[in-house]
Amino acid sequence: QVQLVESGGGLVQAGGSLRLSCAASRSRFTIIRINAMGWFRQPPGKQREFVARISSIGTTNYPDSVKGRFTISRDNAKNTVYLQMNSLKPEDTAVYYCNANTTDGRNYWGQGAQVTVSS
């Protein structure tokens, strides 16, 4: 079992920056490890969409909508993933969800963090 706890959401003006963090916790007695981690978002009235992904060795992927503005990183020692969001736009307004895949093939989600970008 893995728990994901997000922090860092909030309200920011267009052009501003925010950093989201997601800390993963698991039982010290498990041999299960975390593979890829990532971020998804769900804008108001829309479906959840992919934002960023980072593999266990640091390979990253982004959709065109955030490429060049968002940066995903991770600290494996802390089991924490970060999302640095720069040049934010009103259309980035959404609930942002942390995601983690584990070595036993399971998929976990955080509780969500609200990001609101005002124009």
Image (tube, rainbow, N blue to C red):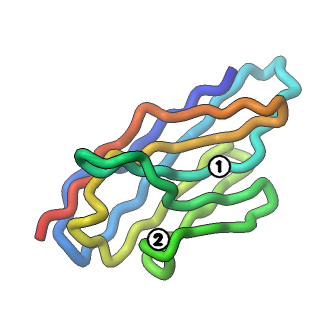
Look at the numbered disc 1 and give the secondary structure of its residue. strand
Is 43 left or right of 75, judged from the image as shown?
Answer: left
Q: Residue furthest bottom?
A: 68
Which part of the image, by quadrant, shows the C terminus? bottom left
Q: Quadrant of residue 79?
A: top right
Q: Which residue is mark 2?
A: 70
User: Mark 1 or mark 2, which is nearer the start of the sequence?
Assistant: 1
Query: Is 90 positioned to the left or the right of 35 in the image?
Result: left
What is the crowding at mark 1: few (fewer than 14 residues within 10 Å), some, or many (at least 20)? Answer: many
**Residue plotted at (79% across, 33% down):** 105
The numbered disc on residue 37 is: 1
For image coordinates 32% across by 69% down, the residue present is: 17
**Residue at position x 51%, y 44% in the image:** 98
User: Looking at the picture, how far across and down is residue 58, in whole percent?
Assistant: 74, 64
**Label 2 element class:** strand
Which quadrant is the N terminus positioned in? top right
Query: From what the image shows, is residue 2 above or below residue 21?
Result: above
Distance CA(mark 2)–CA(mark 1): 15 Å
Image coordinates for residue 78, horizontal then vertical, percent: 67, 44
- Left or right of residue 50: residue 91: left
Mark 2: amino acid: Phe
